[in-house]
Amino acid sequence: MRDVLDELVGWWQAGETVGMGTVVGTWRSAPRPAGAAMLVGPDGTAVGSVSGGCVEGAVYEEARDAVASGLPVLQRYGVSDDDAFAVGLTCGGILDVFVEPVSRESFPELGEVAESVDQHEPVAVVTVVKGPEDRLGRRLVLWPDRCSGTLGLQRLDDAVADDARGMLAAGRTGLLHVGHDGERRGDDLTLFVNSFAPPARMVVFGAIDFAAAVARVGAFLGYRVTVCDARPVFATEKRFPDAHEVVVEWPHRYLQAEADAGRIDERTVLCVLTHDPKFDVPLLEVALRLPVAYVGAMGSRRTHEERLARLREAGLADDEIARLSSPIGLDLGARTPEETAVSIAAEIIAGRWGGTGERLTGTGGPIHRTADR
């Protein structure tokens, strides 16, 4: 919906009803990802795409019918091998498209959603796309600290909000399957969670071989990865092909500038791999005073103790120092840069969701945890 949001809001503000088809599920080589949308305006204008051209005509007619009837519908389309080839795919695919009429009455929160997207404020739109007729098309709009709308039952709202906020925190768009009352083992209802959130950032300091592996794993987990080092001969895009950007700057200066510019938030993770006091102590002075999700620093036990002494000399309080994960990562017995990157990623994931890092075979209770935030 993000790619057609301006046009949708324009018609919505004018009091018009718009037909909207949204890709909510894909299999094999589907042409467009979940969240892609197509609009049919009140004048018959088509905006956006759900299939790169393969099934646009069918969705167009479904959207017109939805506006006329006022009823949403979930349709499954198969993309033939010939159609797939025409839009640059290697094979056919399947996509589920939810088609609905959108108006001020059916989507009163759209203005707030658009404002949040414009201001880069995380927001998720949860829509019932499959289930009983009286629930179909119901919507819940979620921000990190508030919600609007209802799916028809408070217990359902609470359960779905919990899981959908987890998806929003990870910047993921996709489907949830729950029972009528929000039971996580049920599949009576299928809900589409459309997350509008910029990817969380991972900033890796220190242009070493371990940093390349951490950048690779960070990008795989969905972070926007920056590698920063003051040495231009090492901080090059060629050495870090998986990073979204490589910055040549003193680490503490870069981090402070990013924080001052509002580009560091509570989802940001900072991996300090510089392993050099002249870099990492000034950097950690800044990092440990920022409200970020994670600060980890590489080094041996001895390096860690020396670093703690330097940080205390620099005036950091015990509660600030306690936020430091050092030595970095979980105890996986890692040796190689790639194994070390996995141990760092595991610690970040455990911190996000409250995991213990223990083997699941030796623990009890639910496997999946819910974050407090």
Image: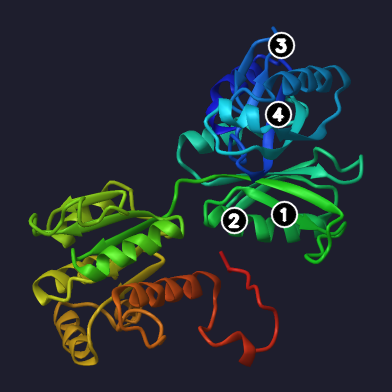
Residue in the image at 82% along x and 64% along y: 183
Counting labels gives: 4
Location of residue 290 (image quadrant): bottom left
- Of badges 3 and 4, nearer the viewer stands 4
- First in sequence: mark 1 vs mark 2: 2
The circle drawn on residue 176 is 1
- Establish if 54 lies above or below 157: above
Mark 3 = which residue? 42
Of 143 and 279, nearer the camera is 279
Callout 2 secondary element: helix
Dot 1 and dot 2 residues touching (CB under 8 Å): yes
Dot 2 and dot 4 residues touching (CB under 8 Å): no
What percent of the width, then of the height, locates residue 162? 67, 61
Location of residue 24 (image quadrant): top right
Q: Relative to 156, is 201 on the left or the right?
A: left
Mark 4 = which residue? 21
